[in-house]
Image: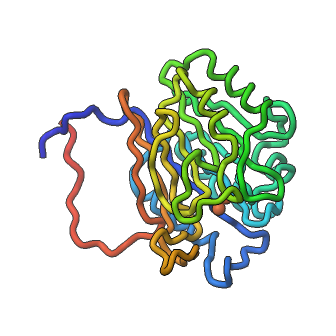
Amino acid sequence: MTPGQHPLAEQVIVHLSDLHLTADAAPLFGVVDADAQLGDAIGRLTASGVVPAAIVVTGDVADDGAQASYARARALLEPVAQQFGAALIWVMGNHDRADAFRSELLGGVDAPAAGTELVAVHDLAGLRLVALDTSVAGLHHGALSDDQLDWLAATLAEPAPRGTVIAMHHPPLPVVIAPSDTIELHGQQRLAAVLAGRDVRGIIAGHLHYATSSSFAGVPVWVAAACCYSTDPLAPDGWVRGQGGGQAISLLHVYPDRLVHTSTPTTALPTLYGFPPRPEG
Ligand SMILES: [Fe+2]
Ligand SMILES: [Fe+2]
């Protein structure tokens, strides 16, 4: 094989979403072992040779908001992040509970934004990753408060050396399987106004449990399929249908001039063929 037309990626970010761990590891819907799905994802990652700069979990870390669920999420992912020297970045989802999330995953630190919103800024070798908190306690839909939008505007006022990626649970996109105010991000135009003219290169999100991509205010958006179980965009008769398969990991390859998102199953599939990587030089 000859080299391609593009340089190698500068960084790889592992993007997981919607782990939905439960306090006692009880199977979701009686059949889905969320711990096993995350374990499979980790096994695939560590066997792959990919060395991520960060592991980002875009929300719904816990299904039940329980302290024990967060403790296990941390116990499973922290050693992997340490092994790679990768940042481990947690984003709040609608299933998450702020007090347990803050104490177990964020070390109890106060968020930099006003109120209880658990936002953060991470510097990944000049690439700025901003974690937003779109959760609304006890409800499925997402929202961004005026305080959080003000904080975001101030954060983005100065460009970062390699631009910005925003991680958020609720994507600012149409929800094709069940358009509804009860699950969408509210107030999307206010977010669009904050992003106008800033250095945001991409938005990564979750919440929908199926992989999808689009753009928002001119910014590419990638929604990762869930790690735990998926929803079916081709459900019979327009139903909303959760299904026990389709779990995936997303990879975000950062190139100088673009982001490339890739989705792959959490579970290893049967090998059909193989060959070794191209030798160096
Ligand atoms: Fe979810
Ligand atoms: Fe969600």
Residue at the image position 87 percent from the left and 50 percent from the top: 99
Q: Ligand 1 lies in which image quarter? A: bottom right
Q: Where 132 sits versus 79, above or below? A: above
Residue 152: which quarter of the image? top right
Q: Residue furthest toward the top?
A: 158
Q: How is the image coloured?
A: rainbow
Q: Position of residue 39 (x, y in %)?
A: 57, 66
Residue at the image position 80 percent from the left and 61 percent from the top: 65
Q: Position of residue 20 (x, y in %)?
A: 67, 65
Left or right: 153 in relation to 161: right
Residue at the image position 37 percent from the left and 27 percent from the top: 256
Left or right: 40 in relation to 47: right
Q: Residue furthest toward the bottom?
A: 30
Residue at the image position 48 percent from the left and 47 percent from the top: 222
Q: Nearer the viewer, residue 113 or 107?
A: 113
**Viewport quadrant of the C terminus:** top left
Residue 78 appears in view: no
Q: Nearer the viewer, residue 183 or 100?
A: 183
Q: Position of residue 215 (x, y in %)?
A: 47, 41
Q: Where 64 sits versus 171, above or below? A: below
Q: Position of residue 72 (x, y in %)?
A: 72, 62
Q: Nearer the viewer, residue 53 or 121?
A: 121
What number of labels is visible? 0
Q: Where 176 sits versus 118, above or below? A: below
Residue 79 appears in view: yes
